[in-house]
Amino acid sequence: MIRKIVLPGTVIGDAKDKLPGKGTFKEGDKIYSSRLGILEEKGKYLNVIPLSGVYDPSVGDTVIGVVEEVYKNAWIIDINAPYPALLSPEESPWKVEYGETSKYLKTGDVIIAIVSYINEAKNIEVSMKGRPCRKIDDGIIIEVQPSKVPRIIGKNASMLNILKKHTGCWIFVGQNGRIWIKGEDEKVNLLIKAIRKIEKEAHTFGLTERIIKMLGG
Amino acid sequence: MLMKDGLRIDGRKPDELRKIKIEAGVLYRADGSCYLEWGGNKIMAAVYGPREALPRHIQDPTKALVNARYNMASFSVEERKRPGPDRRSTEISKVTSEALENVIFTELFPRATIDVCIEVLDAEAGTRCAGITAAAVALADAGIPMRDIPVACAAGKVDGMVVLDLTSEEDKEGEADLPIAIAPRTEEILLMQMDGHLTYQEFEEALELAIKGCKQIAKLQKEALMKKYESFEEE
């Protein structure tokens, strides 16, 4: 069985009794989908959950970033969005003297950070204060399509718990589509295969059962 | 010469399209892609982005740029084409960018760019229409917010008769060629060019015919996109 897939420009409802939510727009007295995705009704709102597309950052997202550039008193972080993000020393967990930023993070280092600020011009700032922010020194990072992240986590992290339980690996999923994995080589390979399967079949029903079967549970 | 018993040289009726095959999501590394066969045309379209526009001075702080690049392969025509951009492909790139820009919600991605690459692998008249049609499918596949999926088709005049979707002989020997691109839902015109001469009545007739053709192709575009997500239903 397939969930209802809508395309850009498809009529999805009447503006009289519904409100346009995410991934939709209103024209006249009709609501249309603006992108390729799955239709979802949430109260009065009609949303379209995208099936593809780049990561669209929002405040509060936990992301895995790569240090792109080091300045005297700031780092530029690539968070897999169309725009780079800024990390200032005040928002880092260390006490950084002016000009000593490279002692703590160098170009190419990987961190877990939280998106703390976005403005209209899409200037983005991230913070490393609090849990689960840290620098990542081991394990591997894989990239998936950001639109498939909710499916990899599942409802109340159900899918994530299955993956953890059956492989015994340490997994951390960033909202921007980067996943940090740590564990035995064999298990990691199996886990990556499972994640790729979820990514490919994200819009189908009964995926959880298929993943359990695949992981030999 | 080009018309016989009301049929054209390739046996089509005046209002009949050439055979069209569309496949979405064929390239792994692009954000969205499409392969299209339209008569003798073979076209590959890829979409990248929205991504940061570089160098920074080309960025627009209010909206995203739409940057289409139309390119013909050197082996796409009978006589080898000198590779690289020329006057013709620069013009087609520009009109395609403008046609696509009108349906994309560019204001959602300030300072970014959406790059569309259209590669013509094999050409047989009507490549700009085929290019826009393929680019539209690739854009939808890339998850870019749009008001509608644009679609393009040409009409023209051959042997004094208004016909749909010209072949290369009809394009060369015929009297006029009218490629248009529309947003099928509202019939808003996104691109219109004309080569040759038409009377006012003939123009109206050709436009109506081209819009009808566009709507048929729009159905095929939608089917192609839906097919990509239905293919592993049985597992």
Image (cartoon, coloured by chain):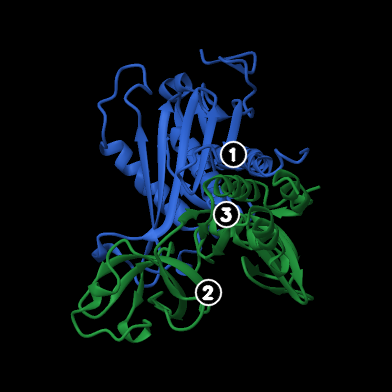
Between disc 1 and disc 2, the foreground one is 2
Classify mark 1: residues with Cα within 10 Å, few (<14), some (14-19) or many (20+): some
Residue at 43% across, 55% down: B49
Subunit ID for the residue under disc 2: A
Query: Quick check: B181 above or below A154?
Result: above
Q: Which chain is blue?
A: B
Task: Check disc 3 and give the amino acid type.
Answer: Ser
Residue A94 falls left or right of residue A158: left
Q: Could you tell me residue B150's position as x and y percent?
A: 55, 49
Classify mark 2: residues with Cα within 10 Å, few (<14), some (14-19) or many (20+): some
Query: Quick check: B173 above or below A57?
Result: above
Q: Earlier in the sequence, mark 3 or mark 2?
A: 3
Mark identifier at residue A52: 3
According to the image, label 1 marks what residue?
B205
Specify the quadrant of the image occupied by residue A66: bottom left
According to the image, label 2 marks what residue?
A61
Q: Could you tell me residue B16's position as x and y percent?
A: 64, 27
Residue at 35% across, 77% down: A87
